[in-house]
Amino acid sequence: MSVIAFKCPDIRVTVVDINQERIKAWNDTDLENLPIYEPGLKDIVATARGRNLFFSTDIDQAIDQADMIFISVNTPTKTYGKGKGQAADLKYIELCARNIARVAKDDKIVIEKSTLPVRTAQAIKNILDNTGNHVNFEILSNPEFLAEGTAINDLLNADRVLIGGDSTPGGEAAKQALSSIYENWLPKERILLTNVWSSELSKLVANAFLAQRISSINSISALCEKTDANVDEVAKAIGLDSRIGPKFLNASVGFGGSCFQKDILNLVYIAKSYGLEEVANYWDQVIKINDYQKQRFADTILSTLYNTVAGKKIVFYGWAFKKDTNDTRESAAIYVADALLEEQAEIVVYDPKVSEQQIYADLDRLNTRSEQENRRLLRVSKDPLDSVDDAHAIAVLTEWDEFKTLDWEKIYTKMLKPSFVFDGRRILDSNKLNGIGFKYYRIGES
Ligand SMILES: NC(=O)C1=CN([C@@H]2O[C@H](COP(=O)(O)OP(=O)(O)OC[C@H]3O[C@@H](n4cnc5c(N)ncnc54)[C@H](O)[C@@H]3O)[C@@H](O)[C@H]2O)C=CC1
Ligand SMILES: O=C(O)[C@H]1O[C@H](OP(=O)(O)OP(=O)(O)OC[C@H]2O[C@@H](n3ccc(=O)[nH]c3=O)[C@H](O)[C@@H]2O)[C@H](O)[C@@H](O)[C@@H]1O
């Protein structure tokens, strides 16, 4: 919404949220305190905020004044009841729809920006159309394809924008109205108009295909480690085939982030609910390989450190699910740490953007051990070099650029010998590290 406000000074954008703390942070005069760390976002907010971009907790007033409403609330995996562990929890979406239905006095275009199961628009429409106040609602699906860490660039130069809506005159007019906003900065050819159901489903499928590429290359990384093949060489060799393409083939300790797993689980659930067991099993395998990859990385650390890590200090470089974000949702680091803590390892975490409070919250949420035990076994450090004294091993969990240029000679002198480095992101220079004397392992290479 900040980018829309930035690019369209004539449109008044109000972002509302029930979370007062978040809205307060979005309004903080110190732009360092915005609740999300995202390169370039600060400048966009600085330009638009107070001009035509506003952050507020007065949801009813914003609904009343709006011509268009983007529903962008969270749609997490259900943790209870039918579909627990797979289906998307739509309670926040429904609450929004009910709120809009209660407050709206004139016609509105309601846009699904959240990622939703196919056919959710029908449920939203039913709620909105049964209010009895004769307001006409047009429902559009406009899924978001930005990736965290590169969000601003992804939005400014989107490959495509997808707008799904009815083919009635009202639906067509609504699609055009939304398209005209994006046309302020994107060529018309990149704005794809479809029916609602194709749009909803395309979002889930796009994430499933992206995640599938990572699981595919990660499965091959395990094979490379057994066969003396090098996963980067394999990725390059296959990626040069223009039908396959080079992107999203970086082997890693496993994909994280709030969406890939959630959206694939949702796809699996939808396929099952239509009786398509084979389809469901096919996509479920993408998650299974991802879990396997995280476990495999933890197992490699354990077996390399002579099958015991109890009382051994292992330093984690990185906790975020990818570089250039402070988001840790479903980060591989959480699960690798949990597996090693089960072995009584002593972990020290250094991440340039993630807070200590967040790291403990991530671990506590797993409920594997008591909160006290998590704090006894895991410490958070603010300095990548101070943390490595007497460490047995360093594990790289996030591909932050700064890890490449650390003083690795100095780090080596501080660690116990033999000094192990486990590179879950393949970002370090193997010749250099081996030259210094490290025992260097990286995913996808023997
Ligand atoms: N994070 C990302 O990079 C992307 C997220 N998405 C989708 O966007 C949606 C939101 O994702 P995030 O922003 O990451 O979630 P989030 O959990 O960070 O933010 C959702 C916000 O909605 C607020 N909220 C919940 N119920 C509300 C209500 N009734 N009224 C007003 N505010 C309410 C919450 O307080 C929270 O601040 C999800 O469906 C996700 O799949 C899609 C593409 C990218
Ligand atoms: O629906 C969403 O939320 C978004 O999910 C992903 O974006 P995001 O999760 O923010 O970040 P990605 O760049 O896709 O990375 C996801 C995970 O995969 C990992 N990854 C990515 C690429 C790769 O080659 N290898 C790999 O392990 C990353 O390190 C990260 O843990 C999609 O890329 C976005 O298009 C989508 O809008």
Image (cartoon, rainbow, N blue to C red):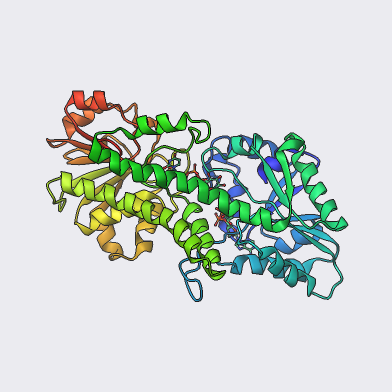
Side of 6 relative to 247 (left or right): right
Give the position of the C terminus as an image quadrant: top left
**In-front residue for pair 223/27:** 223
Side of 349 relative to 30 (left or right): left
Q: Residue at x 64, y 65 (%)?
A: 93
Q: Residue at x 54, y 37 (%)?
A: 150
Side of 380 relative to 186 (left or right): left
In this rendering, the answer to whether 198 lies above or below 368 is above
**In-front residue for pair 431/322:** 431
Where residue 135 appears, as percent x and y from the top left, is 85, 67
Where residue 270 appears, as percent x and y from the top left, is 55, 65
Q: Residue at x 22, y 45 (%)?
A: 314
Count of numbered marks: 0
> Is residue 310 among the parts visible in the rendering?
yes
- Picture quadrant where residue 422 is located: top left
Where residue 386 appears, as percent x and y from the top left, is 25, 36
Side of 256 relative to 75 (left or right): left
* Ligand 1 found in image quarter: bottom right
> Is residue 16 among the parts visible in the rendering?
no
In this rendering, the answer to whether 161 lies above or below 345 is above
- Picture quadrant where residue 434 is located: top left
In this rendering, the answer to whether 270 lies above or below 28 is below
Where residue 143 appears, as percent x and y from the top left, is 65, 51
